[in-house]
Image (cartoon, rainbow, N blue to C red):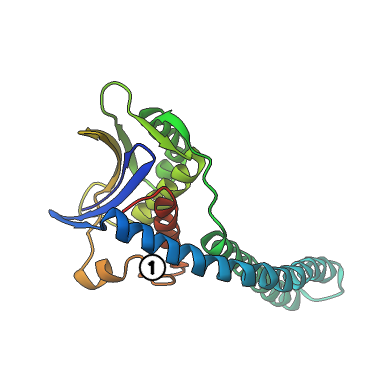
Amino acid sequence: MVEWFLIGAGAGVVVSIVVGRWIVRRGVSRLRAAERRARVAERMAEVGAMTRGLAHEIKNPLSTIGLNTQLLGELIDEASLDDEDRARASRRVQALSKEVERLRDVLTDFLEYAGEVRLVARRVDLNEVASEIADFYMPQASKEGVRLRPDLAPGTLQAELDVALVKQAALNLLLNATQAMHGQTDRTRELIIRTRRDGDQVQLHVIDTGPGMDDETVERLFTPYFTTKKGGSGLGLPTARRLVDAHGGR
């Protein structure tokens, strides 16, 4: 079983990972965390500047390819071809369209990871945010045959958060957890969205009943483009980590 949780205290957020009964805490002192965030911010600013030009150079021809692929499909439908040739040509156009869409997704994921994170934090009830996350993801969980269960702490859990970014981070964790349980038949597939209070901290947990991770996977978990899933971008968890870091997380 894997458990992820975001912990907030004031404007700060911490991300931790529980694998079985072992807790891997990504925590450093406030000074070291601030230094690391400054280094990351500087590096990401440089990457972001380059990606703006890169995105422009890629998106325009990619859109042109996508449009022309669509037109090619229409021409094939209208062409004087026998059924076998038409079917073969259509399959190739469909394959090309899928690759164009995949490249669009890769570009979107990359820009999301490398782009500048700007916080618009406000004081909110974490329970309310968790409920909204659960309501939003419930249809996707049901579609995947996964039971989604909110487990909220009593009362209100006040924290200074950028709600949109916290939801984005949580969604990345939920998607990763759902994928980890794909095809699992030896146990119930369940996701739990849990909130808790721990002293002056509030916590948001995302828990799944998947098989867990080995030590090597845990070590490389937040490395960009590292993935154990077929077709995975390897940027979902690093992006979630960046969003936590942007909140002053440890």
- Quarter where residue 219 is shown: bottom left
Q: Tag 1, which secondary structure?
A: loop
Instruction: Find the residue positioned furthest to the front.
Output: 31
Q: Residues within 10 Å of mark 1 (few under 14, many from 20)?
A: few
Residue 6 left/right relative to 86: left
Is 114 on the left-hand or right-hand side of 247? right
Mark yes or no: residue 175 visible. no
What is the residue that sits farthest to the top in this orientation?
155
Q: Nearer the viewer, residue 44 or 17?
A: 44
Q: Quadrant of the C terminus?
A: bottom left
* Side of 11 relative to 50 (left or right): left
Q: Quadrant of residue 203?
A: top left
Q: Residue furthest left?
A: 21
Front in this rendered view, residue 239 or 213: 239
Residue 120 visible here: yes
* Residue found 57% across the figure and 70% down from its top: 46
Residue 75, x across and y down, in percent: 85, 70
Q: 132 and 141: which one is in front?
A: 132
Give me the residue at 44% from left, 33% from top: 135
Q: Is residue 85 above or below residue 23?
A: below
| Residue 40 on image: x %, y % | 44, 65
102 vs 168: above or below: below
The kind of residue on which mark 1 rests is Lys
Q: Which residue is mark 1?
A: 229
Question: What x and y, as percent, mark residue 101?
Answer: 63, 65
